[in-house]
Amino acid sequence: MGWGKITFFPQAVKFLYPFPANSISLGMRPIIWLAIAAISLSAITTFAQKKPTQEIDYIYPAGGVPGTTFSAVIGGQKLAGINDFAIYLDDHFIGGMNSKDEKLLDAELNKIQEKTKRGEKLTAADHARIEIIKQKLKQFDRNNAKKKNNNINNKFVSVQLTLPANLTPGDHALRVKTPNGFSAPFKFCVGLIPETTKGYWVTPPKKPKDGQVKLPPPYEAAVKLPATINGQSAPAGHDRYRFWAQKGKHLIIAVAARDLIPYLADAVPGWFEAMLVIYDAQGKEVATAERYRFRPDPVLHFEVPADGNYTVEIHDSLYRGREDFIYRLTIAELPFVTSVFPLGGKKGEKTPITLTGWNLAVKQLTLDNSAADTGISVVPGSFYNAVPFAVDDLPESFEREPNDSRDTAQAVTLPILINGHIGKPEEQDVYQFEGRAGQLVVAEVFARRLDSPLDSLVRLTDIDGKQLALNDDFDDKGAGLETHHADSYLTATLPAAGKYFIHITDTQSKGGPDYAYRLRISDPRPDFALRVVPSSIDMRAGKSAPLEVYALRRDGFTNAIDLTLKDAPKGFSLSSGRIGENQDKAKVTLNAPSEPSSKPINLVLTGQATVAGHSLEHKAIPAQDMMQAFFYRHLAPAKELSVMVSGNARPGRKK
């Protein structure tokens, strides 16, 4: 979905417009179009700085089962009319077409069919070969693509995808290579639950002469559990799926929508906002969900009250719809973790943790952090949801009740990482420490970044109760998928030696067993993280390409950072690899080898710096610079820095 012409946006509003329950008047749309056009013109002026590459706006379906072959539609920019393309899942080729191969297949098919024109009888082998050729030619169905033009995402390819049988379940990165470039990664989910796919939606509601839009009837289908359903939400669409369930079953009914496409550039709030409703056989609403805590994608834990048929309905909360409003709806008895405590542990030690959730076979685990790196990883296990877990090298402690006032404050010695809960609404936890005159102190909360619902508020007070510092939300640019940075961070210089207090509570006065946190109180620990953009690079052999590396400086870190490629294949090199002191980013040049690659190559870029005589080294996390809702920009993380080297360097041309 590009920014090329201002006339695009009235069309976009026409399809994204939130329809009411029955019909909508079109009289106000010119005003809305002008407003959107004004916003978009500003966005073009501000952000349209980079030359567009091959982009993916959506893939439908956005997942599959290992070892299966299925039809898919990939929509994006500069896809219409291409004759050569290749689809990669990580570094696996899973579909595509080469124009030379297509011509050879056409010639072979014509040769076999000419036998019948000469009166010859086709053999069983001929018939089998015809079916194989026709199936291969469906990889790029141009005629079908023309029929699906609806003036919004009208550039796409219809393909046959074959997933390797040895794919591991989980999230993978899908990229498209065409003569126009190498696309950014798109999330593709691999699972083991049987899947079904709703038919591809192509027809928007027509604008009648009387100005009233007739809404389409709900889409309805029956599914057998367990199931993962791939669907698209049409404007004002309601998709309903009937299933039979047995009394007492604990079903997880979960949507992946925003999780698939985290940011839409031309939609407010910036993603498909899915909503779930469950009805019993009599049509009575028995459960509903619009979000799961602070996550836009809803999740329901449905304990089946009686044997019988049920219907789950999914629609956009604003009744918008478009081809890229795609979703995966999973209905199954699956293990789902709602909370973990503690939220992290110390590097080099073993940490016992307690899991809470639904359908959990094990609720106590011991995690071995002896070989773990500091940072945030994932609790191992076959859970439906990823469970984050933090590892640090500071001394650790646990909250001890009562500690809800200055009089009962828990004494701690710095530096310290405290694992605690805001156990009930309106509760606060208070920690006391001894400080020095002129000491610079940092208090940082890790909660929301570890999937805790806590929206923290942190205060620093002195012995007389005077407030010295306060923070509610701190913008962590490393959390590129978060739009509400609810974790707190404050720093302050202590005016005198003596006792000081750190107070932590929930901004909205909420609390409960799941409202866990990790609270760091320490001197500053200068450090950095890196993001490298883009995460997909298309290069000609022997040529070069620009990269932008962002330094996310922490706790007052100001030193220069030297950038290098780590264990890169022969022929790759990096030029101008340094982020200067106090600089937040640098442009560097990646040089390609003289020979092309047959598949994507993953590179690792690292940064090294020195702080107080100690060496620091961190991997640069690949990321995509994504726009949300016409204005906001985010560095959305990707798994790999993937490079495709094609062709040969042209003689006489400079690198």
Image (cartoon, helix red, strand yellow):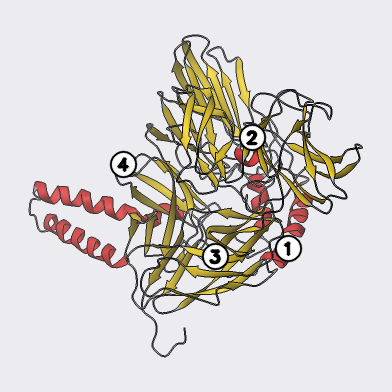
> Mark 4 highlights which residue?
68
In primary-sequence order, the first of circles 4 and 1 is 1
In primary-sequence order, the first of circles 3 and 4 is 4
**Could you say whether the residue bearing mark 2 is in a helix, strand or loop?**
strand
In primary-sequence order, the first of circles 2 and 4 is 4
Please identify the quarter of the rendering in which residue 390 is found.
Answer: top right
Q: CA distance from mark 1 to mark 3?
A: 37 Å
> Mark 2 highlights which residue?
397
Mark whose residue sits in front, 1 or 3: 3
* 378 left or right, relative to 43: left
Q: Residue at x 56, y 27 (%)?
A: 313
Quadrant for the N terminus, please. bottom right
Residue 654's spot in the image, x, y percent? 47, 87
Mark whose residue sits in front, 2 or 4: 2
In primary-sequence order, the first of circles 1 and 3 is 1
The numbered mark at residue 276 is: none
Mark whose residue sits in front, 2 or 3: 2
Mark whose residue sits in front, 4 or 1: 4
The numbered mark at residue 607 is: 3
Classify 453 as above or below 542: above
Classify 470 as above or below 440: above
Please identify the quarter of the rendering in which residue 556 is found.
Answer: bottom right
Mark 1 surroundings: few (<14), some (14-19) or many (≥20) residues within 10 A? some
